[in-house]
Image: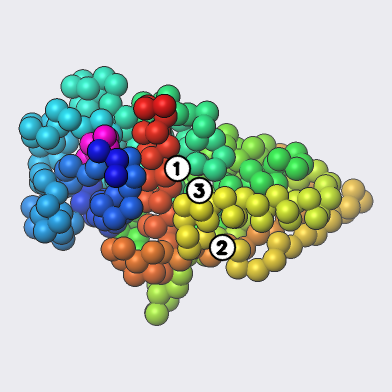
């Protein structure tokens, strides 16, 4: 048993914050949850935290800073909103300049982080941004193609159940598309990226599905397929419900019949289509909420690795 776990607090007692709290309690090797913070005293998340022996505050980040537990906090996960994170980061940094912040909003103050792609380069960052659920699911696929061939354009479509999209997700739709598109380029390696999110109202609710279209220089299809499958296994190591829905598909676009990429020009080369499914672990919400699960899994994996780096 690790008796030197890093004490952490979570800002946000909604779906993501509550699910993350349960994950830390059940499976974290290097972190110990001390406080769950919300702004609604009657929230289900705060009620569950109390039952699990976790200290709570319903007074936001100011409430956390005023708690005796704050003195020992080394990590803060922010699962509020992009606009709230800007204020939260400022207040936390004023009291603890070196505190480690894992940002689960699309605010992107710190470097964009997808664990299997670029976490090792960002271990010393005091604020890392977990992009978005769609970004965590699809950027590894863009990066998998990018390590085989130059990627000119990548487009992702993230389809999630409307029931799994809480008020924070709905308030951040614009930030979702902007942050994910930027991360497709900066982290995934595409020259141009585009992101689309679909809130699917179907009943019964559907599991998260993600489609990735990548236009790259011509490359060996078997090498691209192997790279994608290797990356899927790497993500699956920390997101157990992450998998390919079907085999990777290819289409060769000839020089004499190019397609037009808006803002990039005419393209010929290899089109790679990747179809993913993300099933949640059902720690808090049902299994269809893979969009929630991949965010909390990625955030936990990131904090665990950073915590290990602080003692090694």
Q: Secondary structure at mark 2?
A: strand
Give the extent of the magenta segment: 4-9
Residue 70: percent from the left, percent from the top?
14, 32
| Quarter of the figure that contains the N terminus | top left
Q: Is residue 125 above or below residue 213?
A: above
The residue sitting at 52% across, 56% down in the picture is 236
Q: Which mark is residue 135?
A: 3
Residue 8 on the magenta segment: yes
* Alpha carbon separation for disc pair 2 and 3: 15 Å
Q: CA distance from mark 2 to mark 1?
A: 20 Å
Q: Residue at x 29, y 21 (%)?
A: 98
Q: Give the labeled residue for mark 2.
A: 243
Dominant secondary structure (helix, strand or loop) of the stretch shown in magenta: strand
Query: Disc 1 designates what residue?
Result: 131
Going 40% across and 74% down the picture, which residue do you hit? 205
**Position of residue 1 in the picture relative to residue 270 (left or right):** left
Query: Relative to 201, is 187 above or below?
Result: above
Category of crowding for the residue at label 1, using alpha-carbon neighbours closer than 10 angstroms: few (below 14), some (14–19), many (at least 20)? many
Towards the viewer: 164 or 28 = 28
Residue 110 placed where, x, y %? 41, 29
Q: Residues within 10 Å of mark 2 (few under 14, many from 20)?
A: some
């Amino acid at each position: 048993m690790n008796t030197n776990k890093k004490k952490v607090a979570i800002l946000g007692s909604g779906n993501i914050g509550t699910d993350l709290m349960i994950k830390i309690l059940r499976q974290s090797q290097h972190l110990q949850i001390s406080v769950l913070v919300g702004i609604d005293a009657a929230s289900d998340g705060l009620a569950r935290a109390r039952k699990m022996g976790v200290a709570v505050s319903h007074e936001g980040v100011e409430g956390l800073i005023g708690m005796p537990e704050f003195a020992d906090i080394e990590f803060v996960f922010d699962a509020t909103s992009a606009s709230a994170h800007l204020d939260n980061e400022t207040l936390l940094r004023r009291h603890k300049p070196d505190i480690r912040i894992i940002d689960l909003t699309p605010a992107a103050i710190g470097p964009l982080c997808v664990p299997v792609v670029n976490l090792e380069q960002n271990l010393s960052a005091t604020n890392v941004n977990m992009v978005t659920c769609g970004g965590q699911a699809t950027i590894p696929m863009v990066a998998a193609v990018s390590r085989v061939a130059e990627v000119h354009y990548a487009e992702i479509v993230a389809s999630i159940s409307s029931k799994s999209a809480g008020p924070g997700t709905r308030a951040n739709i614009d930030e979702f598309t902007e942050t994910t598109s930027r991360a497709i380029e900066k982290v995934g390696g595409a020259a141009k990226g585009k992101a689309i999110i679909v809130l699917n109202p179907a009943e019964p609710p559907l599991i998260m599905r993600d489609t990735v279209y990548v236009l790259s220089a011509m490359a060996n299809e078997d090498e691209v397929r192997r790279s994608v499958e290797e990356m899927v296994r790497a993500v699956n190591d920390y997101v157990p419900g992450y998998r390919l829905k079907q085999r990777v598909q290819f289409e060769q676009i000839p020089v004499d019949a190019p397609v037009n990429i808006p803002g990039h020009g005419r393209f010929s080369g290899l089109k790679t289509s990747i179809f993913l499914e993300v099933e949640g672990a059902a720690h808090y919400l049902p299994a269809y909420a893979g969009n929630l699960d991949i965010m909390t899994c990625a955030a936990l994996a990131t904090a665990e690795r950073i915590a290990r780096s602080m003692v090694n």
